[in-house]
Amino acid sequence: MQNYKIIYAKRAYRDLDGIFDYIYLKSSLSKAKEFRKDIESKINKLKKDPRIGTPIGRNKHKLIRKPYNIYYKINTQTKSIYIRHIRHTSQRPLKHDFPTF
């Protein structure tokens, strides 16, 4: 089985940076680094099994890494996963979050 390619939206990078900064300011640099490593590890698991997340629409999924949801779309033709954004579980997903491939 071929691994899927992970593609991050600019929004997803901004989300990760914002979460990192928040944890760093509220806790410590080591906690922020630990979180980022953990969430990136979770996302990288999608390469081998992109359907581990919860389906929320046609080829749309969310992967839960409490207290955050990682929203992504699977493209089976190009073997790619588009990470759109990462939101705290208390926030609703963005409406315009999934592009067409």
Image: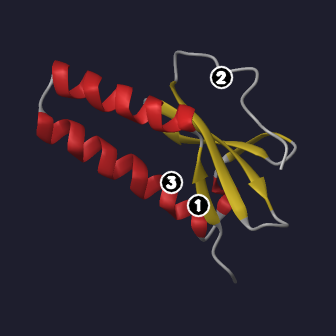
Occupied quadrant, residue 17: top left
Q: Which residue is drawn at 55% across and 37% down?
A: 10
Three-letter code, disc 3: Ile
| Left or right of residue 56: residue 20 | left
* Residue on which disc 1 sits: 46
Residue 93's disc is 2
Element under label 1?
Answer: helix
Label 1 close to label 3 by CB (< 8 Å): yes
Q: Which amino acid does label 1 sit on?
A: Leu
For residue 43, the mark is: 3
Mark 3 is surrounded, within 10 Å at the Cα level, by few (under 14), some (14 to 19) or many (20 or more) other residues, namely: many
Q: How many discs mark residues in the rendered view?
A: 3
Instruction: Choose between 14 and 42: the one closer to the eye.
Output: 14
Label 1 crowding class (10 Å Cα cut-off): few <14, some 14-19, many 20+? many
Residue beneath the point at 40% across and 47% down: 39
Classify mark 2: residues with Cα within 10 Å, few (<14), some (14-19) or many (20+): some
Q: Where is residue 9 in the image (x, y as percent from the top left)?
A: 59, 41
Q: Which residue lies furthest to the bottom in this view?
A: 1
Distance, label 1 to label 3, CA atoms, is 6 Å
What amino acid is found at the position of numbered circle 2 in the picture?
Pro
Q: Where is residue 60 in the image (x, y as percent from the top left)?
A: 77, 43
